[in-house]
C-alpha cells in the first residue's frame, strides 16, 4: 500500500468519524411559542390528517413532561397527576427527521428492547427518573405522551385523553434515534 493510499484512507476515516459524532447529538429542543420551526420532528397525524409534534413542558413539582403539540396551538396538556395545561416554557423537538424512527414496545420488556438503542430522552419525573417519548393510535389520531422508562418491568405510557389522564397503557411505540455507529458498520460490510 503506497503512502498516498494510506493518507487517503486516514482522511476518509476522519471524515466518517466526525459525521458519526455529529449525528449522535443531532437533535435538540427549541422554544415553542405557537409556530412550528422548519426542523421540528413530525410525530404523527391528528384526526384531520395534520402533522403533530413532540413537546416538553415544565410542570412545577412534577418535572419535565412530554406533551403533544398541535400546530398553531400554544397551549399544551401534560398528563401528570391529572392534566396540567400550560403555555409557557414549552419546547419542541427538532432535528433531522430521517434519523428518528418508532419502535413497537411494551411496559414489561422495554428495558430489553432498548439494550442496543438510543431512545430520545423526553424529560424526567421529579424524584423518579428519566422518561421517554411514546405514542399510540387512539380514536383515529396519534397521541404523544410519556413513557415511565425508569420503572423497569412497569414502564407504562401516559397521555392526554380528551382532558383526562390516560394511564397505564401497556403497548406503545417509543421514539428512537438511529445509532450512527451501527449504520456505518453495516454500510461498510
Ligand atoms: C413485549 O415486547 C417484547 C419485545 O419486543 C415481545 O417479545 C413481547 O411479546 C411483548 N409482549 C407483549 C405482551 O406484547
Image (tube, rainbow, N blue to C red):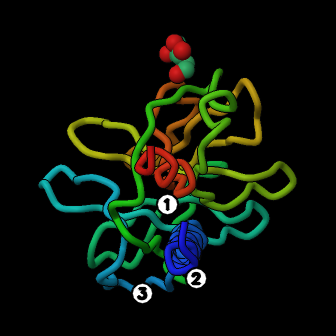
Q: Looking at the image, which residue is at 69% across and 41% down?
A: 149
| Closer-to-camera residue (30/83) | 30
- Quick one: label 3, few (<14), some, or many (20+) residues within 10 Å? some
**Quick one: SS at disc 2?**
loop
* N-term-proximal mark, 3 vs 2: 3
The residue indicated by pointer 2 is: 89
Question: Residue most toward the left?
Answer: 48
**Quick one: SS at disc 3?**
loop
- Quick one: label 2, few (<14), some, or many (20+) residues within 10 Å? few
Q: Looking at the image, which residue is at 57% across and 55% down?
A: 181
| Closer-to-camera residue (5/114) | 5
Rendering quarter of residue 69: bottom left
Give the side of residue 69 with respect to residue 79, left or right: left
* N-term-proximal mark, 3 vs 1: 3
Q: Looking at the image, which residue is at 38% across and 70% down?
A: 96
The residue indicated by pointer 3 is: 33
| Closer-to-camera residue (148/159) | 148
- Quick one: label 1, few (<14), some, or many (20+) residues within 10 Å? many
Give the side of residue 52 with respect to residue 186, left or right: left
Q: Is residue 63 above or below residue 73?
A: above
| Closer-to-camera residue (78/99) | 99
* Label 3, label 2: how far apart the Cα atoms are: 9 Å
Amino acid at each position: 500500500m503506497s503512502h498516498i493510499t494510506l493518507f487517503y484512507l486516514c482522511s476518509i476515516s476522519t471524515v466518517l468519524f466526525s459525521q458519526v459524532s455529529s449525528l449522535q447529538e443531532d437533535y435538540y429542543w427549541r422554544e415553542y411559542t405557537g409556530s412550528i420551526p422548519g426542523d421540528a420532528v413530525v410525530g404523527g397525524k391528528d384526526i384531520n390528517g395534520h402533522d403533530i409534534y413532540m413537546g416538553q413542558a415544565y410542570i412545577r413539582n412534577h418535572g419535565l413532561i412530554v406533551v403533544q403539540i398541535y400546530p398553531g396551538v400554544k397551549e399544551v396538556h401534560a398528563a401528570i397527576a391529572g392534566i396540567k395545561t400550560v403555555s409557557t416554557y414549552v419546547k419542541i423537538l427538532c432535528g433531522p427527521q430521517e434519523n428518528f424512527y418508532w419502535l413497537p414496545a411494551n411496559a414489561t420488556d422495554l428495558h430489553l428492547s432498548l439494550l442496543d438503542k438510543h431512545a430520545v430522552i423526553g424529560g424526567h419525573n421529579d424524584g423518579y427518573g428519566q422518561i421517554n417519548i411514546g405514542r399510540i393510535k387512539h380514536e383515529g389520531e396519534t397521541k404523544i405522551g410519556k413513557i415511565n422508562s425508569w420503572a423497569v418491568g412497569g414502564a407504562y405510557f401516559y397521555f392526554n385523553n380528551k382532558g383526562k389522564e390516560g394511564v397505564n397503557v401497556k403497548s406503545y411505540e417509543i421514539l428512537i434515534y438511529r445509532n450512527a455507529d451501527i449504520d456505518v458498520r453495516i454500510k461498510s460490510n
